[in-house]
Amino acid sequence: MGKYKIIVETTGKKNSAQQRYNLITRNKINADIKTYKTDGGELYSVEVGPYTGKKQILQDVDKIKSLGITNAFITGA
């Protein structure tokens, strides 16, 4: 199982998360939208991964940033 993932966007707006997801998957990067329930409502997180190796995750985060999503970041276990 992979240790790392890329967080593309976390938002309270489902439509915004869906647009980011569509952009990422159109560019041949597998992504998921995770829904988290909070006291303030639902949060939608567009995530890529998991990854086990550095090479692929660094390539994908660079590709995502080149699409204009400059706040994407890598997180690990």
Image: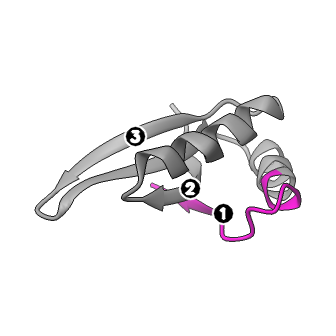
Residue located 80% across and 54% down the image: 58
The residue lying toward the viewer, choosing from 76 and 27, is 27
Local SS, label 2: strand
Label 3 crowd bin: few (<14), some (14–19), many (20+), radius 10 Å: few
The residue lying toward the viewer, choosing from 28 and 53, is 28
Measure how far apart labels 1 and 3 are at the Cα level: 15 Å
Q: Give left or right: position of 11 versus 17.
A: left
Badge 2 amino acid:
Ile
Local SS, label 1: loop
Specify whether residue 73 is painted magenta: yes
Residue at the far bottom in the pictured view: 71
Indicate which disc residue 36 carries: none
Tell me the residue that label 3 is attached to.
34
Residue 43, position as x, y percentages in the image: 33, 54
Quadrant into which the C terminus falls? bottom left
Local SS, label 3: strand
Which residue range is magenta in the image? 64-77
Residue 20 seen in the figure: yes
Tell me the residue that label 1 is attached to.
72
Whether residues under marks 2 and 1 lie with C-beta atoms below 8 angstroms apart, the answer is yes
Residue 42, position as x, y percentages in the image: 25, 51
Indicate which disc residue 7 carries: 2
Please tell me which of labels 3 and 2 falls first in the chain.
2
Please tell me which of labels 1 and 3 falls first in the chain.
3
